[in-house]
Amino acid sequence: MEPRIWLIAGPTASGKSALALRLADATGAEIVNADSMQLYADLRLLSARPSPAEAARAPHHLFGTVDAAQGWSAGRWLRAASDLLAQIARRGRPAIVVGGTGLYFHALTHGLAEIPPVAAEHRRQAQADYDRMGEPDFRDRLAARDPAADARIAPGDRQRLVRAWEVLAATDTPLTEWQSFGQPTLKAGAWRAVALEPPREALYARCDARLAAMLEAGALDEVRALGARDLAPELPAMKAVGVREFAAHLRGEISLVDALAAAQRQTRRYAKRQMTWMRGQMGDWPRLSEIEPDAQWGQFVALNPGLTP
């Protein structure tokens, strides 16, 4: 099979990492991470990063390579991923880009525009509005003008919500529209894509079970170690689902049962937002509706003749 680039997008817990690994086994591909949380070294468990055994089955790139003290933007990820894809192509191997961060895929396939500078007065006003209105009302106002931004920004992500509004206020153009401009990294015809969209109830059940398994595997220790670093709360890694909830338990503010329930609830909400993004921004991508690995692989093979069932 000639070298190509495969894009596999899907919500959290949908099985995309397992699908990517199975495809790598079948094609000899190298895997590139497109999940904004799996970038961070400090979030091995809470980001559901591939295990050492899984990572040993195929070359993996951009998994756990960034320190939590850094905050990577979509542009920084795009530059790193583009360089890696070029290197993989020079080696004559296929590449699989897999993850749940829709903006990363959009950057690859549509490009990222240079957004005009936002004046300090707009930044201050957006911050003040958020403090005055609270997240629900602030988000509702944003959704009325830029529904795609509302769909992709996770609950509690004050930084990105404020950024989306300040750009809109300063330029009278939604941030999502700015991000639709620019030249794509991947040329048309150079890639194949698939989006995982399993039944919602099955996905939510898997989200809940995976959070409980993370807790059993030591997620509290991971959050404790992250908290000991005293990092700025606005850093992306500090906003990962589970960090805030389990940190509250470690401070004695809520029980472990309540912390787990809160993290599970946020994970389900995050998965819902990811699926909303895919429907809005990846509407023409083929869909896989199965969630069980063998059935999911069967659907994938049906869409890609030449692969072994």
Image (cartoon, rainbow, N blue to C red):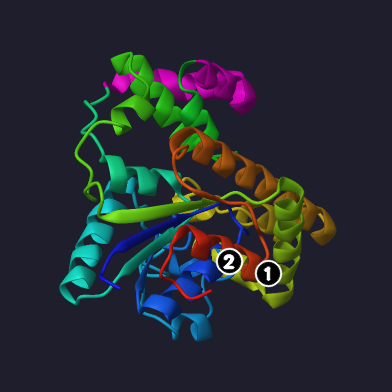
Kind of residue indicated by mark 2: Gly
Q: Is residue 133 above or below residue 175?
A: above
Tell whether 218 sits left or right of 139: right
Instruction: Report the Cα–Cα distance between label 1 and label 2.
Output: 28 Å
Q: Residue furthest left?
A: 90
Spot occupied by residue 107 in the image (x, y as percentages of width and height): 31, 44
**Residue stretch rendered in magenta on the structure:** 119-144
Residue at 46% over, 22% down? 146
Residue 223 magenta-highlighted: no
Residue hosting label 2:
298
- Residue 133 highlighted magenta (yes or no): yes
- The percent coordinates of residue 58 (x first, y second) are 40, 81
Identity of the residue drawn at 56% across and 67% down: 297
Counting residues from the N terminus, which is met first, the one under dot 1 or under dot 2? 1
Task: Give left or right: position of 208 versus 20.
Answer: right
Amino acid type for the residue under numbered disc 1: Met
